Image (cartoon, helix red, strand yellow):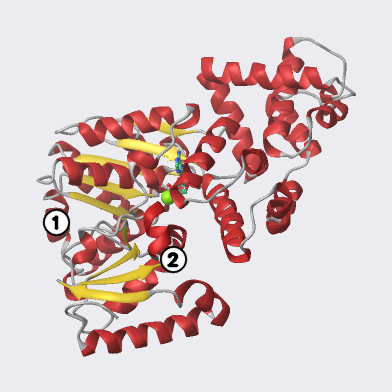
Amino acid sequence: MAGNGLTQEINARWTRVRGVLRAEVGDSAYKSWLKPLGLVEFSGGVVRLSVPTRFMRDWIANHYGNRITELWRDGNSPVTEVEIFVLSDAEDARTQTPPKAPSEIAVSATVGARVSPDRVEGDVSAALDQRFKFDNFVVGKPNELAYAAARRVADAETATYNPLFLYGGVGLGKTHLMHAIAWHIREHQPGRKVVYLSAEKFMYYFIRALRFQDTMAFKERFRSVDVLMIDDVQFINGKESTQEEFFHTFNDLVDNNRQVVVSADKSPSDLEGMEERLRSRLGWGLVADIHATTYELRLGILQSKKDEIGAVVPDKVLEFLAHKITSSVRELEGALNRVAAHASLIGREITLETCQEVLHDLLRASDRRISIEEIQKRVAEHFNIRLADMHSARRSRAVARPRQVAMYLAKQLTSRSLPEIGRKFGGRDHTTVMHAVKKVEELRTSDTTFAEDVDLLRRMLEG
Ligand code: ADP
Ligand code: MG
């Protein structure tokens, strides 16, 4: 083992960390992923661990990063940060990693995470994910507004759109955008203090302050913050007095020109269990929603993700995944990771067949999830037409439009082919379905009410 500054203590810790990890993840995952980690160096509170490939580095950082960091920092530890970097053997080094500048990923790199355990109290910001930056956020129709707003807030030197309210379904990139704002500000305006935390954490601090009758200190703490980001505010509910206080704190911040960014899975007006006044207050700034992904966006994300993990995946497979995994970007990424992990373990190329094999449970689940009948029923209910009109030959706008929406959703949410969908709609031709999909896509961009309707239906069906 190379390395300066590797003390006995660090070595002993490393043995212990590995022991715990092994017990936690089981032998086979340990052998595949964690055993190859090498302890290389310890200096300035940073432990550096090596792995042989970029892919492994990302995988380990994604799946075990937080835990590894936690274990290293446990107890009275001199370790504040853990870095995993690629140390390839001579052959790989030529192709991917210049020896002097190993590509690095700090497992839980953040300003906040640098603090030792006893200071966590003082610093309320949660750790930021390295991967969640503007650079690797793929922009498409469904998220362009939210992206533009996030960028504007990140670039601004004072509060703009206050608050910025980002909302959208699970796994569509809200947290990614918030972290990206934080990273951007930390990089370009290091003097501004940015705090990012979940609504639950925020409420936790808040309720604790109430309990200890220390809300002044609580407010002070947040008042020193330039940009406050609270993720998943749908979890802020509960007693009126709590909400009342929250409301005042919130107003305080906005009045003092602090930028506030919040996210939720619903629009402000749909937030349940929240006082009307607070709901409406949250909608005062800019409300930007992230729509369900489109095929194009999914494909774009897969392409970028593929490059990121350095996996070789044929376009066919990417297209297949973009068609099949429509629920959330998180699931999409998960599917790609699984396929890539499988290929790298087995040492074989990724093909459509292996992909289907590896993901069979997931693909079946997404097929099972929504049927065309269910879509027709929901859409008919929503637009207040008869279910029979989904199959009928009537062409009046009042029934034709909902029928098109149902076809569109059938294409998006199921894995049925165009002819199959056509058959389910009273034996229509596949070109009719294609036309419907096009038409709905067009309308979605030109008519926001319509777009909201369609997204609402979609979420309902997916949920
Ligand atoms: P949410 O907070 O809305 O539930 P996240 O921000 O956690 O969703 O996103 C889920 C995953 O999908 C993350 O790994 C994120 O990086 C990824 N993701 C979502 N949208 C995009 C996008 N447009 N480009 C790249 N990655 C994305
Ligand atoms: Mg989130």
Indicate the quadrant where residue 37 lies: bottom left
- Horizontally, residue 367 falls left or right of residue 230, namely right
Contact (Cβ within 8 Å) of mark 1 with mark 2: no
Decide which of 162, 154 is in the foreground and name it.
154
**CA separation, marks 1 and 2?**
35 Å
Task: Tell me if mark 1 has few (under 14), some (14-19) or many (20+) residues whose alpha carbon lies within 10 angstroms of its own.
Answer: few
Q: Position of residue 395 (x, y in %)?
A: 80, 11
Comparing marks 1 and 2, which lies closer to the viewer?
2
Residue 7 lies, in percent from the top left, at 19, 86
Query: Can see residue 452?
Result: yes
The residue that appears at 47% across and 41% down in the rendered structure is 304
Q: Secondary structure at mark 1?
A: helix
Q: Which residue is mark 1?
A: 221
Please name the residue that numbered disc 2 is placed on: 60
Picture quadrant of residue 79: bottom left
The answer to which of marks 1 and 2 sits earlier in the sequence is 2
Residue 104 relative to residue 156: left or right: right
Q: Quadrant of the N terminus?
A: bottom left
Label 2 residue SS: helix
Foreground pick, 116 / 222 = 116
- Front one among 259 and 271: 259
Residue projecting furthest to the right: 427
The quarter holding residue 456 reads top right
User: 428 above or below 411?
Assistant: above
Asked if the residue at label 1 sits under 8 Å from ligand 2, the reply is no
Residue 248 appears anywhere in the view: no
Residue sitting at 16 percent across and 70 percent down? 119
* Residue kind at label 2, given as amino acid type: Ile
Give the amino acid type for the residue marked by disc 1 in the picture: Arg
Where is residue 356? Give x, y as percent. 72, 52
